[in-house]
Amino acid sequence: MLSVRAAVLYTALLLGANPVAADVAAADAARAGDMRKLNFAPAVAVPEIGLIGMDDAPRSLAEFRGEWVVLNFWATWCPPCRTEMPSLGALQKVLGADGVEVVTVATGRNAVPAITEFFREAGVEHLIALRDPKSALAHEMGIAGLPVTVILNPDGEEVARLIGDADWSAPEARAVFAALMR
């Protein structure tokens, strides 16, 4: 009898001590529509590689710890990125106050005026735009094509990845985040 109680207690402590794992399982089960392309995996640390803001100031993903981060790798020359970007802006507008931060990373050679023009043409106003001019972060994270969107948990670890574009403003995307943030 003691071993059954110990097993139950251990299981309860394990589940209670790791609520993010339970949230990921619920979010994985909630995938539908474009979100079926979102692949969940065990949490992995993201490399601490510096990025650059639109004002040329150094930036870091560590700034966003404590929030769920939708980290979108894109480029100004990428047609699917142009299609996807407004939906990322809509996601930020809807979930930004709830602890979700959409952070875009223009990887490779993307001049600030071109990024500004891209956002203006796409009608994007609610997104953080960072730059990875030498693609150092993209390479370290294994980003081979664009766009790629990576979900980071509040500890700054990658928990999911979607390769290609998606409609992040769709109810299916909100359902995934609602499950993650329980």
Image: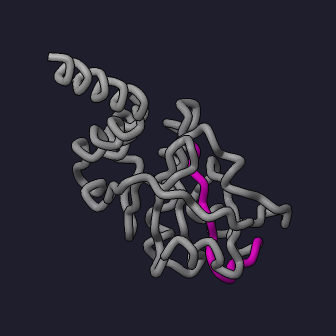
42 to the left or right of 140: left
The image quadrant of residue 117 is bottom right
Q: Position of residue 53 (x, y in %)?
A: 77, 62
Q: Position of residue 129 (x, y in %)?
A: 68, 59
Residue span colored magenta: 101-112
Q: Position of residue 149 (x, y in %)?
A: 46, 62
Q: Is residue 58 above or below residue 128?
A: below
Position of 102 compared to 176: left or right? right
Magenta-drawn stretch contains 107: yes
Looking at the image, which is closer to me, 156 or 82? 156
Determine the image quadrant of residue 58.
Answer: bottom right
Identified at 73% across, 66% down, the residue is: 51
The answer to whether residue 171 is visible is: no
Q: Closest to the observer: 128 or 59?
A: 59
Kindly identify the residue that appears in the image at 37 percent across and 33 percent down: 178
Q: Is residue 152 left or right of residue 166?
A: right
